[in-house]
Image (cartoon, grey):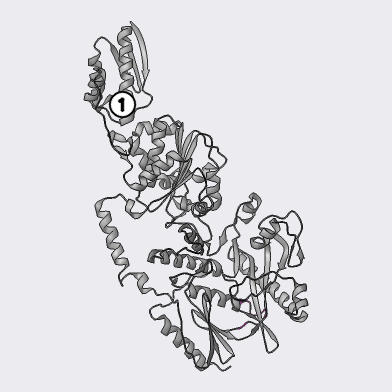
């Protein structure tokens, strides 16, 4: 008589023993000469040595079957103990058997492509709409690798983006605040691993689920690492995550770039990573589409109903018109100029009427759809800052008779733009990084870093190039030598530039922002120098968020900016950079609406005011009536 111990390591005891221990009772009856005691995952076997060895051999086979299929029936136990061949379960594109033996299958073409890409690459990006199974298949691949002992652990992560409620206002401890963000990952795991086994894996850190911030400083080896909802990572976050990859490890990054919940100042790390790492060996990319969505059949009918409604005249965006073209004929009109965004009408060679349209441009291309309220927002930002700085120097603005219009004095513009910089960044940093230690004749010391504040702002003028050509840096000395501006006028332009920048910086600071750099244009009328064109808008200025600036600077991290970069990122993610042969991606009503809303966020951050949407039902007639009424009353 000997006593042997067997431990169930890879299966859930409840599944192995069966309902009411039915499976265990059957096994005992099949080995009547042995005394078997089972508690938890431990079995004690007492009896003849030969019989005990046979028992342990069969138990191993039963456990192996249970581990693979996540289920166990009495018929299977009988077949294994009696040495009969087991029924062959063949299912195409089978990944694993989930809880209760449910087959986890790569069903769609792109799901199957994700499986193949995972097998061929160490890093895979899976991008596409919700409901396509990106995350589910990714987790199934990780669980399969764990069951096959190809890895030692699974690590799942998500960024905890505050979409709606702030984390601080959610109830409970930090774990309670974060768990709702991670629940979809728990749900997928519970479909594949029995609850008790999953709990054991998590207690032993075999499976780890953690917010993205907890990944910093780790090297992840012998693992499959999955980053879900990656569209809501920042540039620095996704770079940090991707550089955690260790030996014998694989990564899958999933996301939907149409569902970015970051603030308008932040660039999606996923969008940028897709561009930077495009074509790199060892990295796969699978793009899912709506045809991959696997949901209840009613969901498909719901989606179709919404699509139909979105195309109907009742859809809100259909009523919310955008102004993309004007062709007015005002009394006394002598000229009109149509720029990329603004249409400028000259009246009696005395006034300029500047209409800020809803056109939007990127990569020197005007996009096919206008963005509702964009023109109003830019016009009102410029108008407000012109009013707030009118005590510093005269400006061209005389009135804003319409939310999208500014009327002002026609001036003869100076052939230079006055660029003022408070920080070393952008083109100035790129020049400095390449070895330049002088910008527009201004010497710069060695040892400066990107985004470092200058001891005092510097003025770095540029020429005003003809349309289609680039502006060029030019020094004060060269401006005077070429006679572009007189010495007296230049001294005044420089004085105004620094005072305007100081005022703009003070206003920005009061709104939690840093005015990093900006440009001013000046003109002359009847011997008087005027500030002309726009001022302190997102198109002419760069802003940083003040909160966290110093910490990010010390760490060498990118600063959070207020900009329209999110539009460029969306275009790049959809294969457009303005190059020959490329087409602008479809701008659906949903895309147009999202761009409009994010522009409004820019407005509210910069002005500190709530944006009040103008009536868009009769845009052209509204604008024409407001301008005509103003001109009739204008006294000159």
Q: Position of residue 106 (x, y in %)?
A: 33, 42
Q: Quadrant of residue 618?
A: bottom left
Asked whether 383 or 448 is in front, the reply is: 448
Q: Main secondary structure of the magenta part?
A: loop
Asked if residue 393 is among those painted magenta in the image, a careful observer would answer: yes
Q: Quadrant of the N terminus?
A: top left
Classify 634 as above or below 370: below
For the question of whether residue 101 can be seen, the reply is: yes
Residue under label 1: 65
Q: Residue at x 70, y 76 (%)?
A: 496
Q: Residue at x 39, y 33 (%)?
A: 199
Q: Quadrant of the C terminus?
A: bottom right
Side of 493 relative to 398 (left or right): right
Q: Position of residue 75 (x, y in %)?
A: 21, 24
Classify 363 as above or below 266: below
For the question of whether residue 172 can be seen, the reply is: no
Q: Quadrant of residue 588?
A: bottom left
Q: Quadrant of residue 186?
A: top left
Side of 32 relative to 252 (left or right): left
Asked whether 580 or 45 is in front, the reply is: 580
Q: Position of residue 620 (x, y in %)?
A: 42, 82
Side of 74 relative to 99 (left or right): left
Q: Which residues are magenta?
A: 388-396
């Amino acid at each position: 008589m000997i006593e042997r111990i067997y431990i169930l390591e890879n299966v859930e005891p409840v599944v192995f023993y069966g309902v009411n221990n039915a499976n265990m009772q059957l096994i005992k009856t099949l080995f009547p000469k042995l005394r078997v005691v089972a508690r938890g995952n431990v079995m004690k076997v007492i009896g003849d040595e030969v019989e005990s060895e046979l028992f342990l051999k069969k138990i191993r086979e039963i456990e192996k079957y249970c581990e693979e299929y996540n289920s166990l029936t009495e018929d299977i136990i009988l077949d294994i103990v009696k040495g009969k061949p087991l029924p062959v379960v063949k299912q195409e594109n089978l990944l694993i058997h989930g809880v209760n033996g449910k087959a986890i299958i790569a069903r769609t073409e792109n799901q199957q492509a994700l499986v193949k890409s995972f097998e061929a690459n160490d890093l895979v990006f899976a991008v596409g709409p919700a409901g396509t199974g990106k995350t589910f298949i990714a987790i199934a691949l990780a669980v399969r690798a764990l069951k096959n002992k190809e890895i030692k652990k699974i690590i799942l992560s998500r960024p905890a983006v505050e979409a709606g409620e702030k984390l601080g206002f959610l109830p409970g401890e930090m774990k309670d605040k974060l768990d709702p963000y991670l629940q979809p990952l728990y749900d997928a795991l519970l479909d594949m691993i029995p609850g008790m086994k999953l709990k054991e894996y998590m207690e032993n850190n075999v499976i780890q689920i953690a917010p993205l911030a907890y990944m910093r400083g780790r090297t992840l080896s012998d693992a499959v690492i999955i980053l879900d909802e990656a569209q809501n990572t920042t540039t620095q976050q996704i770079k940090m995550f991707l550089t955690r990859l260790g030996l014998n490890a694989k990564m899958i990054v999933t996301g939907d770039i149409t569902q970015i919940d970051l603030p308008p100042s932040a660039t999606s790390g996923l969008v940028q990573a897709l561009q930077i790492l495009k074509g790199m060996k060892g990295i796969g990319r699978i793009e899912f589409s709506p045809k991959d969505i696997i949901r209840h059949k009613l969901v498909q009918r719901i989606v179709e109903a919404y699509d139909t409604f979105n195309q109907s005249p009742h859809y809100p965006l259909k009523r919310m018109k955008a102004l993309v073209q004007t062709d007015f004929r005002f009394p006394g009109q002598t000229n009109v100029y149509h720029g990329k965004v603004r249409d400028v009408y000259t009246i009696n060679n005395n006034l300029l009427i500047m209409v800020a349209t809803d056109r939007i441009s990127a990569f020197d291309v005007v996009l096919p759809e206008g963005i509702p309220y964009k023109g109003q927002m830019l016009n009102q930002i410029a108008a407000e800052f012109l009013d707030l700085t009118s005590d510093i120097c005269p400006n061209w603005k005389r009135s804003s008779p319409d939310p999208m219009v500014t009327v002002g004095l026609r001036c003869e513009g100076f052939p230079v733009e006055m660029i003022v910089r408070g920080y070393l960044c952008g083109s100035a940093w790129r020049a400095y990084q390449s070895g330049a230690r002088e910008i527009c004749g201004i010497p710069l010391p060695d040892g400066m870093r990107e985004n470092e504040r200058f001891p005092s702002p510097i003025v770095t003028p540029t020429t005003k190039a003809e349309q289609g050509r680039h502006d060029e840096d030019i020094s004060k000395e060269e401006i005077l030598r070429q006679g572009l501006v007189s010495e007296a006028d230049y001294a005044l332009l420089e004085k105004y530039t620094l005072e305007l920048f100081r005022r703009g910086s003070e206003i920005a600071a009061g709104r939690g922002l840093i005015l990093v750099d900006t440009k001013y244009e000046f003109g002359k009328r009847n011997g008087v120098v005027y500030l002309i064109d726009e001022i302190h808008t997102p198109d002419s200025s760069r802003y940083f968020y003040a909160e966290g600036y110093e910490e990010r600077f010390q760490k060498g991290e990118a600063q959070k900016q207020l900009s329209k970069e999110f539009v460029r990122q969306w275009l790049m993610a959809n294969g457009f950079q303005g190059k020959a042969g490329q087409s602008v991606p479809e701008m659906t009503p949903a895309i147009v609406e999202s761009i409009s809303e994010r522009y409004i966020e820019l407005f509210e951050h910069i002005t500190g005011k709530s944006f009040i949407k103008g009536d868009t039902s009769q845009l052209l007639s509204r604008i024409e009536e407001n301008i005509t009424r103003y001109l009739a009353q204008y006294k000159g």
